Image (cartoon, rainbow, N blue to C red):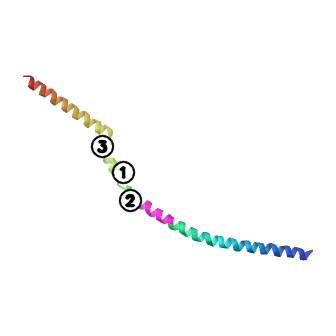
Amino acid sequence: MLEQRVARLESDISEIKSLLKELSADVKGLGGRLTKIEIDIAKIDGRLTGLDGRLSGLDARIAGLPSTWTMLGIVFTTWALGSGILIFAMNFLKR
């Protein structure tokens, strides 16, 4: 009876050893993949850093654009000036 238990234990241990060998091979394969992923992440990080550099002055450029109210003010001012010139010319030509 003790010999049977020892035999089962030895077979279980041999199965465990074979599983550990397979896992070891899988882990080694993952190590190469992780290195490739780290390289890809470094490339992406470099691209994001370059993009950040390009976008750094964008907020100043957008702030320099005229607002809607500024554009409307310019349009209404030119309309008012044009109307004033027309009224002046019509009164001047009437005489």
Marks 2 and 1 in Cβ contact (< 8 Å): no
Total marks placed: 3
Of callouts 1 and 3, the N-terminal one: 1
* Magenta span main SS: helix
Is residue 27 found left or right of 10 in the rendered image? left
Label ID, residue 66: 3
Residue 71 found in image quarter: top left
Range of magenta residues: 40-51
Where 95 sits versus 19, above or below?
Answer: above
Measuring from the top left, give residue 69's x and y in whole percent. Answer: 31, 37
Disc 2 versus disc 1: distance between alpha carbons? Answer: 12 Å
State the mark number for residue 53.
2
Q: In which quadrant of the rendered image does the N terminus lie?
A: bottom right
Image quarter in which the C terminus is found? top left
57 left or right of 20 in image? left
Which residue is pictured at 44% across the width and 64% down the height?
46
Q: Nearer the viewer, residue 28 or 81?
A: 28
Q: Amino acid at mark 2?
A: Gly
Residue at which label 1 appears: 59
Please name the amino acid that badge 1 sits on.
Asp
Instruction: Say above or below: 29 vs 71.
Output: below
* Secondary structure state at the residue bearing disc 2: helix
